Image (cartoon, rainbow, N blue to C red):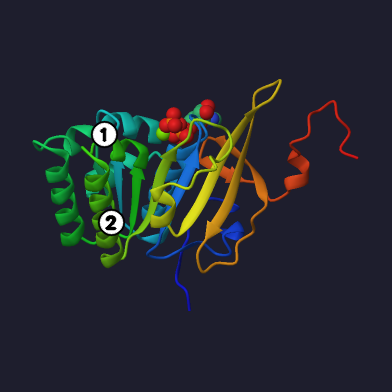
Amino acid sequence: MIELTKTGIEGLDDILNGGIVRNSTTLVSGNPGAGKSIFGLQYLYNGVERFDERGIYLTFEENATDLAEAATSIGFENWEAHVEAGDIKVYDKQVLLREGDFSSSIEKLLGDIDDASYERLVLDSLTMFQLFFDNEREERTYLLKFTDILRENGLTTLMINEQGTTFPESDVGLENFLTDGNIYLIQTPTETGVNRYVWVAKMRKQNIDSDIFPIEISEGGITVHQNASAFSMIGENESPL
Ligand SMILES: Nc1ncnc2c1ncn2[C@@H]1O[C@H](COP(=O)(O)OP(=O)(O)OP(=O)(O)O)[C@@H](O)[C@H]1O
Ligand SMILES: [Mg+2]
């Protein structure tokens, strides 16, 4: 029986056929402003609020205050209380770059993960994380080590992947081999604003619904709508028939 971790994001767990496979690593890709960080914040926040699961948020934001402000402004009002209680642990840029070199920081982080019990982790972002290594060999070594430690400690992880284009790039990078699942957040401009979508492209061991579903970001975070046809990607002036 496969154990699942619920995201708690309305509509998403249904598409995932119950949730994300426990102890797996899922890549969350999307262009700027697509909602990747909100997705990550919501995943950790719901973990603590609803499922009694503690989480770690790794961010390359300057400081944890910026992250707390983002969380509070979207409606996760107990974010700071959870951080103070230690149920959410934030490693911001200041913490991550405190040691002389990045590898030492990662070693320290891995030690912390080993010592305490957390169930969820968000890396925001993998793209930034990769930039801090001197060469590809070091990057690969640490990524593999990192994912091993996450697995050994039973963490269910979201790795955020920054993409420059609206749709997934065709070349398959290293990150795709390291991950068990791929979720894309897509935003497309319209005459009046943006349309937002989520696409679960891959989830190892899970029979997922691979359609593209419309999403909404509002107070309270991300909501996934099940009725794909009501949010057609066809322009308003074109007939759908
Ligand atoms: N309270 C809110 N109500 C509605 N939309 C919001 C709210 N707060 C933020 N947003 C929208 O959410 C989006 C930002 O999401 P988020 O910061 O998660 O994006 P991202 O994918 O992490 O972007 P980046 O790659 O730049 O980090 C913005 O497009 C913003 O318009
Ligand atoms: Mg972000």
Disc 1, SS:
helix
Question: How many C-alpha atoms fall within 10 Å of the one at disc 1: few (<14), some, or many (≥20)?
Answer: many
User: 232 and 106: which one is in front?
Assistant: 106
55 to 218, vertically: above or below: below
Looking at the image, residue 22 lies above or below residue 139: below
List x then y, in percent, for residue 64.
26, 34
- Say if residue 74 shows up in the picture: no
Percent x, y of residue 147 = 30, 57
Left or right: 77 as drawn, with respect to 149? right
Say what amino acid the circle numbered 2 marks: Leu
Separation of residues labelled 2 and 1 (CA atoms): 26 Å
State the residue at coordinates (52%, 60%): 203
Residue linked to disc 2: 144
Q: Residue at point 15% right, 60% down?
A: 115
For discs 2 and 1, the disc positioned in front in the rendered view: 2
Q: Is residue 183 left or right of residue 115?
A: right
Q: Residue furthest left?
A: 100
The residue labelled by disc 1 is: 64
- Whether residue 188 appears in this view of the structure is yes
Query: What amino acid is found at the position of numbered circle 1 in the picture?
Result: Ala
In the image, which disc is placed on residue 154? none
142 left or right of 75? left
Disc 2, SS = helix
Residue reaching furthest to the right = 241
Point out residue 99 in the picture as x, y percentages from the top left corner: 10, 38
Q: What residue lies at 13% left-to-right and 49% top-to-bottom?
A: 108
* Label 2 CB-ligand 2 distance < 8 A: no
